[in-house]
Image (cartoon, rainbow, N blue to C red):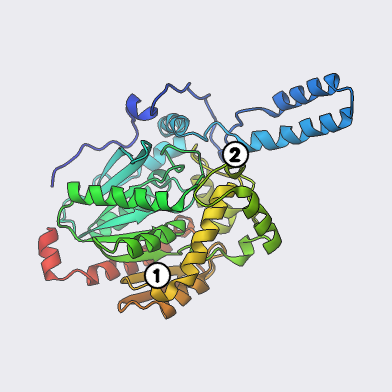
Amino acid sequence: MKETPVVYKKLSSASMSTSSQTASPPTICYDEFDPPPLISSSAILGAGFFLFVLAMIWPPLVLMVGFVASLVVPYCYRVNDDGPSRRLMMQQFLENDPIAIKRSSAFPDHKVRLVSSFWKNPRGLLLHSIVMIPKDQPVKAVICFCHGYIDNPSYTKAPELAYLCHTGGLAIILVEYEGHGQSDGALGLVKDWDNLVEDAHLFFQETLADRFPGVTAFLMGESMGGAVAYTMIQKYPEPYRGVVLMCPMCKIADDMMPPDFVVNTFRMIAGPTGTATPVGYLPLAPSKGNLQKFSFKLDEKRRECVRHPAVFNRKPRLATAREMLDVTKRITASLSDFDAPFLVQHGLSDRVTDPQLSQALYDEASSDDKTIRLYDGMWHALPGEPDDNIAKVYKDTIEWVTDRLGPKDSKKNQ
């Protein structure tokens, strides 16, 4: 197999921007990263005061509007919302932050070859991708990994995916969706579910043909990525031998959902499916609780995973919430039609996605090859679990994948 030089920290200047130069971001002290707003509260208050002075009628109302805007606008628009700025900020973070440097130095590069690059999708957007290849052993199979909502997997999931790679002898390929990680697009915005699925499938298809011709491939999806993988293998059963679904987003847990009348109201103003109107762009979708706090069992791991510049720590954008609600409804209604070979893995203490729907998928799916593994006490985010739990989950994953590789596959994949 042709080797490609590893690029993990450095990005070329061409990759920093798709069409225009972006000013260098300010130096930031990373603790639990909270992206600064593009427009400050003081600027909004100043504009409101100016309107108040000019207003001759209802001046208190003008001041009230200015006050509300001073709260809403800085919350909705942040300096890391566009892809080129995130890439510059991530480079600064990876090169200067002590914890990021320590995390990078702990990556097992003596066991895993990691290649980082950018792939241009059919709409001309640069999407960040990584490929992991085990060293000193043949590649048994390729895992095409679909990551979760607002994840930055090239940073947050690299250590655990490297474990899966060198322990199982599995190559890992993934692409960060539009609006995620270091990819182009408004951060956290999923305006068209079909585009997200098509981008990932096209990247997998091209990478498998170019780097792993003839090697057996499996899909794997975590959380929202489980819904991506579910949708993808139903539409494109080839070239995937099967799919691993980890805490899949078959349904958003009731604990995370507001009352139905609130959901219906916001659906009306978010705009039609597949679009992102100015209102749909706003991160104002009603939801209960803090997603990160509900997802990560270990608080120290949660803090490590929310301190990078690609973090999205606001409410879901209205268009994103609409797309996720629509796809979970379609999945829930189609469980009996799911016929692909699958392994579904879910923590029974998951408060973000519903483990009962994973059980329903196993019970109702028409697949002749289906397996379920439920884990007592485990939460939603695998990176937030103790290392022993991560190893336990991936041991089950490796066994399931390996059991579906016959002698012909093993010989061919070497």
Relative to 148, say whether 313 is above or below. above
Relative to 27, say whether 156 is above or below. below
**Quadrant location, the C terminus:** bottom left
Residue located 46% across and 76% down the image: 359
In the image, which is nearer the foreground, mark 2 or mark 1?
2
Residue 153 visible: yes
Residue located 28% across and 70% down the image: 399
Residue 379 visible: no
Q: Horizontally, is 261 left or right of 8 in the view?
A: right
Q: Quadrant of residue 334?
A: bottom left
Q: Horizontally, is 21 left or right of 165 in the view?
A: right
Residue named by callout 1: 344
Q: Secondary structure at mark 2?
A: helix
Picture coordinates of residue 8, whole percent (x, y): 32, 37
Q: CA distance from mark 2 to mark 1?
A: 37 Å
Q: Horizontally, is 16 left or right of 216 in the view?
A: right
**Viewer-proximal residue, 278 or 373?**
278
Residue 278 tag number: 2
**Viewer-proximal residue, 101 or 85?**
85
Residue 382 tag number: none
The three-letter amino acid code for the residue at tag 2 is: Pro
Asked if marks 2 and 1 touch (Cβ < 8 Å), the reply is no
Q: Secondary structure at mark 1?
A: strand
Relative to 293, say whether 36 is above or below. above
Picture coordinates of residue 199, whole percent (x, y): 35, 48
Q: Residue furthest front?
A: 272
Q: Horizontally, is 165 left or right of 85 in the view?
A: left
Residue located 57% across and 35% down the image: 35
The three-letter amino acid code for the residue at tag 1 is: Val
